Image (tube, coloured by chain):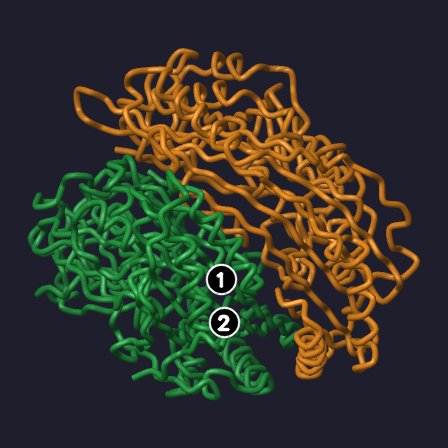
Amino acid sequence: MLGKMTTSNSANGYTQLAADVLAHAKACGATEADIVVADGETFSVQVRVGTVDRLTKAREKRLGLRVFIGKRSATTSTSDFSRASLDRLVADTCTLAGAVVEDDVSGLPDAGHMAAEQPDLDLYDDTVLDTDTQIDWAKRGEAAAFATDSRVTNSEGAEFDSSSGRVVLANSHGFVGSYKSSNFSLSVSPIATESATGGMQRDAWYEVQRKFARLASAESIGQEAARRAIRRLGARKVATKRVPVVFDQETAGSLLANLCSAVSGYGLYKRASFLLDQLGRMIASDVMTIYDDGRMVGGFGSRPFDGEGLATRKNIIVERGVLKSYLLDTYSGKKLGLPSTGNASRSVGESPSVGPTNFYLVPGVKSQQEIIGSIQEGLFVTELIGFGINMVTGDYSRGACGFWIENGELAYPVEEITIAGNLKQMLKDIDVVGSDLVFRGRIASPTVKIAEMMVAGN
Amino acid sequence: MPEPVQLTTFGVTEIEAQQALDRVKVRDVEYADLYFESRTSESVSMEEGIVKRAAKSVSQGVGVRATAGEKTGFAYSDELTKRDLEVAADTARYIANSPKGHSSVPVPTQRRPTRDLYPIERAKAEVATAERVALLNEIDAEARRYDPRIKNVMASFNTEYKVVVVATSEGTLVGDIQPLSRLQITCIAEDQGNRQVGSFGGGGRVAFAYYREESRHLSYAREAAREAILNLSAVDAPAGVMPVVLAGGWPGILLHEAIGHGLEADFNRKKTSAFSSLIGKRVASDVCTIVDDGTLPFRRGSLNMDDEGTPTGCTTLIEKGILRGYITDKLNARLMGIPLTGNGRRENYQSVVLPRMTNTFMLAGESDPHDIIRSVKKGLYAVSFGGGQVDITNGKFVFSASEAYLIEDGQITKPVKGATLIGNGPEILTKVSMVGHDLKLDNGIGTCGKDGQSVPVGVGLPTIKVDEITVGGTQR
């Protein structure tokens, strides 16, 4: 059912469109400009208790323009590509830019720094799936969850998504870049019920791949989702105390995401990060080495050039606990007196910001089971909720659920508790990194253990 | 009365809309609608004392939806030609068992919403960029004047001007113009290596002049600066179960997370909510009465009509502690056989309709707020919050304080660092023992996320005492 792009919307068509808009911006007084054109197709089907609950299909496109008039700049975007609309957009953008204040460091990257080559990073799969195939994937995933255990009594559904799209970036230095990417994913969210109390627990499992053929079977995803929901049945609160805390891959990934934003240029130059002025210093324990690799073949965060058209690359961020590099784009780099690290991230309607590409913690040697096995009493966290993170101070307090560890084993599920500390200390207290690194998104971490945190419950 | 918004705004005729609906509404499709939306968003933002950034975004499109039983078929397009409408209609009706048996939909009759909660002329909502720049400059100066330890001020002013028309297979054609704006300020205070943050903001479906009335923008700036300076002297938060007094206004986020989401009809129809089948049962102490009211003039969470064209209303969720009702959209009201409450909302034409809150608040009680504080021997007084989140199925919710104090022997004493509060939705309100007479609605900053869709909402609360809740600090 997913049709091919029509030729009028081809990369070549957008390249010409971009060139026209850039020329028009110049005629309106822009000294520099860049333009992003993105389009794509999305399909999504949600199945619930065996029948289709929701089916969504669309094509979309957007164009974003940034102009500089000297040191003043503004950004606009539209989904209307008609000549009249784009003429209005260019005029509006130049007017807006005239209304803001000059900013000395603003501007495009130097012309000589633009990405010279654009390697194919294998981000795109042209597999076309018909609607019924995608419905079938979702149905099989959910059915497998129900079949796993009779305590799986209900479902928030299973969802199969496929999307593909293209990004074209061009600027007034003459840079033109383009790449295509795709994603295929299945998620299953079963609900388990404890017959004695009627208490319900939900959990979910998902997989996402750039290539359809790499997706695990619908059945295995559904079974894992069911296993996760069932193991939460009978969860209770625990007494307030300080204990070692083990974070599974997903929750450890969220800690890594916190670290990632703390070393991103914008928070740093605004003095809104808990890791100011730490370049070259120990910010984490020496078991921590972190890379950000924009060129990983098939990676979820891979791209041949960044949001400003600079080449992406592999940067070492933390080496044995020492902060080696920030994540920077041209603007935040200039504010900090450093060159861009190729981490400009660009959403169509906004000026660039900084984002990770494939940001990961290098795995250690111990399995998750060995890490849990080494703990007398502690907490194994499998889900975190809420927004209790202060990026300026590093203060950390979040809702958690998971399992209580007794004598090296998972004794029972726990919920309605919080874990609290300060990220500055927590990063230094990570004393074990697991061996189980798997990429399921742009930020990936193996299991990690923090020596001690405050767990609040009863 | 608002001016009727015409389909011609979108370059579409009534006949074309009717033809598209005819095409969607094959025999076993029970309901279909077209949602036309045009949105202009603008923002200016400042930091380091200068207004550096200005942005504007324009989007327009149509969402086409068909429902049959529990099934929803949905497609959207950013092109509005007859052909695009037909393609979207064909996709939406895919969920029907048999794509046959045309049933002609009635010719739509244009109507307008029955009230106008935000009568703002476009010219008054959209002012020159220079005026917005001036507003932000004054904010920066005011925050720095408040205390020399304020080292950076980040302020942004965002506006959105949304024009919508909903055409349904029931023969209605109704439009609305929905202005919305928000001013948000964050201050960083720094004192001998100790850095802290404070935030404040406000807004609503208001004209630009609102922000200058009574120098509201400057009072927001002082509030953000005050919170940052106060946090310089904050001590570590306590950990464990204790009584918590919540101040009025924005702490009403408790209601939004603890019960609001759990009372959205979709979760209850699917029986995936911790509140499923609790209608008529006690879920709160008898001092608690909670409503969801989309009809308050100029408020961020208010709407003349929801995104299915249903007039919004005031729904009693909990009356003196007893669970009375759910909030619904058309699909869930029909499937559950319960009243339609005008809570069918969507983020934009690219999203499906879900039952969502508008302005959710607890009605005032009889206690004096001072007496409430005095009644606590050792506990927490929480004045301002960041975000919150809930697990609908097991009812566990969190919300995180950004300004809080210890209460010791009935007195407010030291400020404490932010901490997350965690509780169980169906249980927490049974522990509310006192409700103040000082109901306050929030300033208009709330955005609610559900299923990946963000919509503006409001909350409100009088001062209340919760006898016990788990506070996630670091100190015993």
Examine the rendering and report whether any part of residue B402 can be seen.
no
Residue positioned 55% across, 74% down in the render: B148
The label number, if any, that marks residue B62 in the structure image: 1
Contact, CB < 8 Å: mark 2 with mark 1?
yes
Residue B355: image location, x then y, percent: 30, 53
Q: Position of residue B215 (x, y in %)?
A: 41, 86
In the figure, the orange chain has which letter? A
Do the dots labelled 2 and 1 sit on one chain?
Answer: yes
Measure the alpha-carbon separation of dots 2 and 1: 11 Å
Image location (x, y in percent) of residue B212? 43, 86
- Say which residue appears at 27% left-offset and 65% top-offset: B310
Q: Relative to residue B45, is residue A372 depicted above or below?
A: above
The subunit letter for the residue under badge 1 reads B
Give me the disc on residue A222.
none
For the residue pair A133 and A109, the one nearer the viewer reads as: A133
Which amino acid lies under the numbered mark 1 shown in the image of this protein? Val
Chain B shade in the render: green
Q: In this view, which residue lies farthest toward the front?
A: B101
Of callouts 2 and 1, which one flags the residue occurring earlier in the amino acid sequence?
A: 2
Of residue A47 and residue B283, the one placed in the foreground of this image is A47
Q: Residue at x 43, y 12 (%)?
A: A408
Which residue is label 2 attached to? B12
Residue B60, quarter of the rendered image:
bottom right
